[in-house]
Amino acid sequence: MMVQFSILPISDNRHISEPIAKALKIVHESGLEYKLTPMGTLVKGEWKEVMAVIKKCHEAVRKDYDRVMTHIKIDDVKINEHSFEHKIEAVEEKAGIEFKK
């Protein structure tokens, strides 16, 4: 399965790179395939593994903030052997152009 998630600590501070870095370190150390984007993180793996990592990230950020919102979007395909890039390439092929990355 492929999951996109983002964590948003609610506070007066406009800069959230520090808590995001804390969460991404957890994702990196998990050994799961992942890709950081400006609006969230993509993670690929089995349900239990992915959800455990997201929970750990949420809890790590929650320790430092009174309120944290975690958004999760799941793409669960029975046979999903494609990379993150393959999904983009398939759309580019059908459009006949290479999109900006």
Image (cartoon, rainbow, N blue to C red):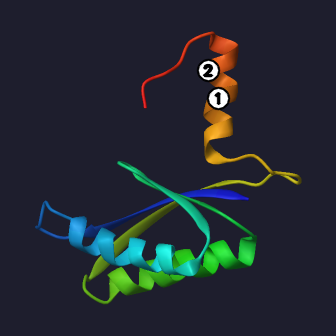
Residue 20 drawn above or below residue 38: below
Q: Amino acid at mark 1?
A: Glu
**In the image, is residue 11 above or below residue 1?**
below
| Residue nearest the observer in this picture, 88 or 68 | 88
Indicate the position of residue 75 as horizontal and vertical percent values.
70, 51
Mark 1 and 2 residues: CB-CB less than 8 Å, in contact?
A: yes
Point out which mark residue 89 bears: 1
**Crowd around label 1: few <14 · some 14–19 · many ≥20 (10 Å):** some
**Quadrant location of the C terminus?**
top left
- The kind of secondary structure element at disc 1 is helix
Q: Position of residue 57 (x, y in %)?
A: 45, 79
* Circle number at residue 65: none
Residue 60 x, y percent position in the rendering: 38, 85
Q: Is residue 67 above or below residue 76?
A: below
Q: Residue at x 45, y 80 (%)?
A: 26
Name the amino acid type tagged 2: Glu
Left or right of residue 20, residue 45 in this image: right
Residue found 39% across the figure and 68% down from its top: 69
How many residues crowd mark 2 within 10 Å: few (<14), some (14–19), many (20+)? Answer: few
User: What residue is pinned by disc 2?
Assistant: 92
**Residue located 34% across and 83% down the image:** 62
What's the distance in space between the residues labelled 1 and 2, CA to CA?
5 Å
